[in-house]
Image (cartoon, grey):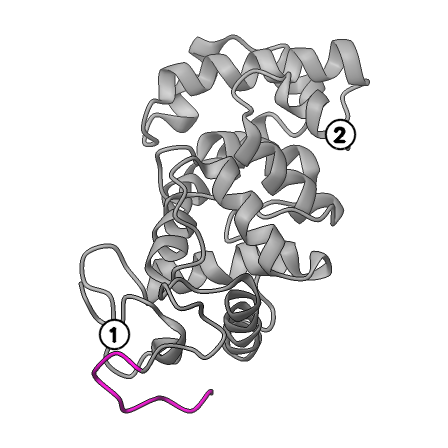
Amino acid sequence: MPKVPKATSPKPKDKAQGSSGRESLKAKKQRAQRILAVMEQLYPQAATELQHKNPFELLIATVLSAQATDASVNKATPALFQRYPDAFALAQATPEEVEPYIKTIGLYRSKARNIVLLARRLVEQHGGEVPVDKAKLRALPGVGWKTATVVLGAAFGVPGIAVDTHLTRLAARLGLSAQKDPEKIGGDLERLFPKEKWVFVHHALILFGRYRCTARKPQCPGCPLYDDCLSQGAW
């Protein structure tokens, strides 16, 4: 466990900052490296919490997780995947047949339509396999930039930092990005962290945001990132 700082007030401005007080790119990259080191100690095996056995299951689970918790998705998908184990099986279903399996997940009606159409597209255009291509993934129903980036990283190891609500919050609090658009935040983060660590950074920061730097009551006292957080308890 990283040494926990005892300071409770903002630390002096980094020497690498300019006279205007704005943090230089060099200083920000140095902070990012320290943040990465802490994440590697806290979550050395960081990975998605969405339960899946293959890329198809991960793709479906990630689509279902939009505006829903991973926990709610994990409760629903075992029965769903037992009934529809692959794209070919799901493509034969109707949305109405799928709805009972996912009715505990938010927006389940629209998601049922999307995953059935998605499965049909996989069968028609990709032989039932999940394509290892971001453009082709994004062309599937219910799949946006975040979902495509998550699936490529977690299922195939393709470098990328997908940004959800947790990463949006952490990027702002830690002072790593001032952007609001998830794709732009992802671009800022990818410029700060080594490419070979992008997938890990995505998963580790999600875990940190989900269980420590929460939206309403972040655990700032004793936080191992306190010295490198520009917010420093101002929540």
Q: How many marks?
A: 2
Decide: is 216 above or below 63. Answer: below
Closer to us: 195 or 222 = 195
| Residue 34 drawn above or below residue 109 | below
Circle 1 is placed at which residue position? 220
Looking at the image, which residue sits at the far front? 19
Residue at the right extreme, as displayed: 127
Residue annotated with mark 2: 133
Closer to us: 50 or 161: 161
Circle 1: is it few (<14), some (14-19), or many (20+) Cα within 10 Å?
A: some
The residues tagged by marks 2 and 1 sit, at their Cα atoms, a distance apart of 39 Å
Nearest-to-viewer mark from 2 and 1: 1
Tell me which amino acid carries mark 2: Asp
Q: Is residue 89 above or below residue 176?
A: above
Mark 2 burial class by Cα count in 10 Å: few <14, some 14-19, many 20+ = few
Q: What x and y, as percent, mark residue 107? A: 33, 22
Q: Which residues are magenta?
A: 2-11
User: Which secondary structure, mark 2?
Assistant: loop
Residue sitting nearer the eye, 177 or 3: 177
The image quadrant that residue 53 belongs to is top right
Query: Residue 27, percent across and down?
Result: 52, 70
